[in-house]
Image (cartoon, rainbow, N blue to C red):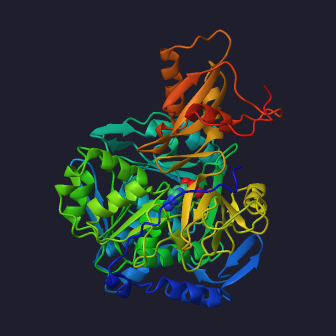
């Protein structure tokens, strides 16, 4: 692991207009931060009290390192806070959700309509025998029914596990069996670039040897899709909710009851089921959405993430709806039918807050300024970024071309495990391109060496979180050791797994992962998962993968492959192996390059030294190779 290295950066600063701070929820960052530090429990109590609780909590937190209970004994329901609370007030007929499909299709739900659909689906799930605590897997494209399904689970206390629609059968299978899902909700197809892509056969394959699954609910978007297998398990989404009552009381949940499981890639072995709970997660998602995006009632908010990722959970669905916002979701891709599609959505719907990923921003940079210039982007007031470092060039382009030098850019650093934003530059504060910013009020973070000692500014180190926060994950599903490991690496702290550096002003720049994860287009990919997919191909004896810097995606995956005896390297075999990874793990985990090799650098204990492969690939010094075997 790297440590104590110096990092070069500039002091270039952008100052927002003073009116931004004056009109914001957060006001002065330092003042808000000081208030938090002075009395963390009152700070969180105040934020939690803006939400509805069926009965109050006895205290704000119980902290027995590394286990926390937030708002213990408090009773609440996050779906109630997203919907019932809004239909009881002036937001009843406000637009909650705008869905924009490909080819100019649109659907709009007011808060009341969404509320009723969610209650119908909640009753539908009950009809299938789903009860509080059961797990439900949601494997769907970005359609309103995906969000309706999530909220319906939350309403009845079922634990959802949303799996991104881009995952393949093997990845989906391990997530279904890992969570022991009783019901899987899916769709027959997803639409992408004008074509329909079948999803249902992936589910059919994924539920083989998944004995927990009792029913598969299928949203049918194309008629004439034949039922292939498991006919007796299948239920049509709209048949299920056709004759049910549109009334369903929200289940009274304990703050510490699980709300959802979300799988994230780990550096070793199977993906980790990150567990979030009802009360703490709710408060964290609500507070950050309100303050980081400064949501007001006339905002039109668009987060481009898929609910299959944590960004979609916290900042498409739960955070914005708890704040009564109007949200937009789209099924389309940013460059279809052309590179102007995002900017037309901004103009057509008058988007005021846009939250997207550096990989998309860099793609737009490549396409040129003519595309955004064709649309009127003057409705925008805040720009957000998430998923990987927003490099200074991309920051500047986003700020100048999309924000017309007037919109604050919030580069938000956080993780599946944190559930909410942890580090960013609060609107109204000076912005330093390349630096995400400071810990938000509510968060204590620092850059330290391997013993936990803070490193001076300009010196790189490990990013750690020093104090618990409400939306922290409570567990890795059925794997207490993996939970413990986060807290054992640097004693006393939560080790994030990222390298970072601070500037004189205390702003944090995140440099990238320090472990065996590759961030591709903002998605965390575990080297272990890709390697095991590669070696499951019959021609592959051994494999190692590394991340290679890429202009658009941040990183791409390069695979080094040793073939089994009797197989000869060829382009045809390369394509076959790539296709194999694509169908097992999904397109997002597919290497962009394969090199056939005859040996791999390993330690004496047999661990592949990816760092050596990477250095060689990049033409750099491999550093200490004293532990290398050969
Ligand atoms: C990892 C977490 C948070 C939702 C999306 C990813 C990287 C995330 C930033 C940022 C630099 C970032 C980190 C982090 N990351 N946001 N603003 N600047 N790096 O969630 O899959 O749990 O991945 O993504 O490496 O540890 P995730």
Residue 68 at x, y = what percent?
A: 71, 74
Residue drawn at x 58%, y 49% as measured from the top left: 214
The residue located at (51%, 69%) in the rendering is: 437
- Examine the rendering and report whether any part of residue 264 can be seen: yes
Depth order, front residue of 238/434: 434
Say which residue appears at 21% left-offset and 68% top-offset: 378
Q: For this rendering, which residue is in front, 17 or 517?
A: 17
Residue at the extreme top of the image, as rendered? 566
Residue at (36, 46) in percent of width and height = 220
Q: Is residue 561 left or right of residue 9?
A: right
Q: Position of residue 14 (x, y in %)?
A: 38, 71
Q: On the rendered structure, is 272 left or right of 491?
A: left
User: What is the quadrant of the C terminus in the image?
Assistant: top right
Give the left or right position of residue 304, taking residue 422 as reference. left
The reply to whether residue 332 is in sight is no
In this picture, residue 195 sits left or right of residue 496: left
Vertical comparison of 311 with 321: above or below: above
Q: Nearer the viewer, residue 423 or 325?
A: 423
- Ligand 1, seen in the image, is in the quarter at bottom right
- Residue 502: image location, x then y, percent: 58, 66
Quadrant of the rendered image containing residue 242 = bottom left
- Could you say where residue 67 lies in the image, as x and y percent from the top left? 75, 71
**How many discs mark residues in the rendered view?**
0
Query: In front: 154, or 596?
Result: 596
């Amino acid at each position: 692991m790297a440590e104590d290295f110096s990092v070069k950066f500039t002091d270039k600063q952008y100052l927002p207009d003073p009116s931004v701070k004056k009109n914001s929820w957060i006001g002065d960052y330092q003042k808000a931060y000081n208030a938090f530090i002075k009395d963390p429990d009152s700070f969180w109590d105040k934020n939690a009290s803006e939400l509805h609780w069926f009965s109050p909590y006895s205290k704000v937190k119980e902290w027995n390192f590394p286990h926390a209970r937030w708002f213990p004994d408090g009773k609440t329901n996050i779906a109630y806070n997203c919907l019932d609370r809004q239909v009881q007030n002036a937001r009843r007929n406000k637009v909650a959700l705008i869905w924009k499909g490909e080819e100019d299709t649109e659907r709009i739900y007011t808060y009341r309509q969404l509320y009723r659909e969610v209650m119908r689906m909640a009753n539908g799930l009950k009809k299938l025998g789903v009860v509080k605590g059961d797990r439900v897997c949601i494997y769907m494209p970005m359609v309103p029914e995906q969000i309706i399904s999530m909220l319906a689970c939350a309403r009845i206390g079922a634990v959802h596990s949303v799996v991104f629609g881009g995952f393949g059968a093997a990845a989906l299978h391990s997530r279904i069996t890992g969570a022991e899902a009783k019901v899987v909700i899916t769709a027959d197809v997803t639409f992408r670039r004008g074509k329909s892509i079948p999803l249902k056969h992936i589910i059919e394959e994924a539920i083989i040897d998944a004995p927990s699954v009792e029913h598969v609910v299928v949203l049918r978007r194309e008629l004439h899709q034949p039922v292939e297998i498991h006919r007796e398990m299948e239920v049509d989404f709209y048949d299920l909710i056709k004759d049910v009552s549109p009334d369903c009381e929200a289940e009274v949940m304990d703050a510490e009851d699980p709300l959802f499981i979300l799988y994230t890639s780990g550096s070793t072995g199977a993906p980790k089921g990150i567990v979030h709970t009802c009360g703490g997660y709710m408060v964290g998602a609500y507070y950050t959405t309100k303050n980081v995006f400064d949501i007001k009632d006339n905002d039109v908010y668009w987060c481009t993430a898929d609910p299959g990722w944590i960004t979609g959970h916290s900042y498409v669905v739960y955070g914005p709806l708890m704040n009564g916002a109007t949200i937009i979701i789209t099924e389309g891709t940013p460059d279809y039918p052309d590179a102007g599609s995002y900017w037309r959505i901004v103009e057509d719907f008058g988007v005021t807050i846009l939250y997207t990923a550096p990989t998309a921003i860099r793609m737009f940079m490549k396409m040129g300024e003519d595309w955004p210039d064709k649309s009127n982007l003057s409705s925008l007031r805040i720009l957000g970024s998430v998923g990987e470092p927003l490099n200074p060039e991309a920051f500047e382009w986003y700020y100048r071309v999309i924000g017309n030098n007037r919109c604050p850019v919030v580069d938000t650093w956080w993780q599946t495990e944190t559930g909410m934003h942890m580090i960013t530059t609060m609107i109204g504060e000076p912005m330093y391109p390349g630096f995400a910013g400071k810990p938000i009020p509510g968060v204590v973070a620092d850059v330290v060496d391997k013993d936990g000692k803070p490193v001076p500014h300009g010196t790189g180190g490990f990013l750690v979180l020093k104090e618990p926060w409400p939306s922290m994950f409570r567990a890795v599903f059925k794997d207490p050791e993996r939970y413990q490991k986060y807290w054992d690496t640097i004693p006393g702290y939560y080790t994030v797994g990222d390298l970072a550096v601070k500037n004189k002003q205390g702003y944090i720049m995140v440099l990238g992962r320090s472990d065996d994860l590759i961030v591709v287009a903002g998605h965390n990919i575990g080297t272990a998962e890709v390697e095991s997919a590669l070696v499951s191909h019959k021609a592959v004896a051994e494999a190692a993968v590394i991340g290679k810097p890429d202009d658009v995606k941040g990183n791409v995956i390069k695979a080094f492959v040793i073939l089994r005896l009797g197989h000869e390297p060829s382009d045809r075999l390369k394509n076959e192996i790539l296709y194999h990874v694509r169908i097992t793990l999904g397109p997002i985990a597919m290497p962009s390059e394969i090199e056939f090799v005859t040996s791999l650098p390993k330690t004496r204990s047999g661990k592949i030294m990816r760092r050596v492969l990477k250095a060689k690939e990049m033409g750099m010094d491999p550093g200490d190779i004293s532990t290398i075997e050969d």
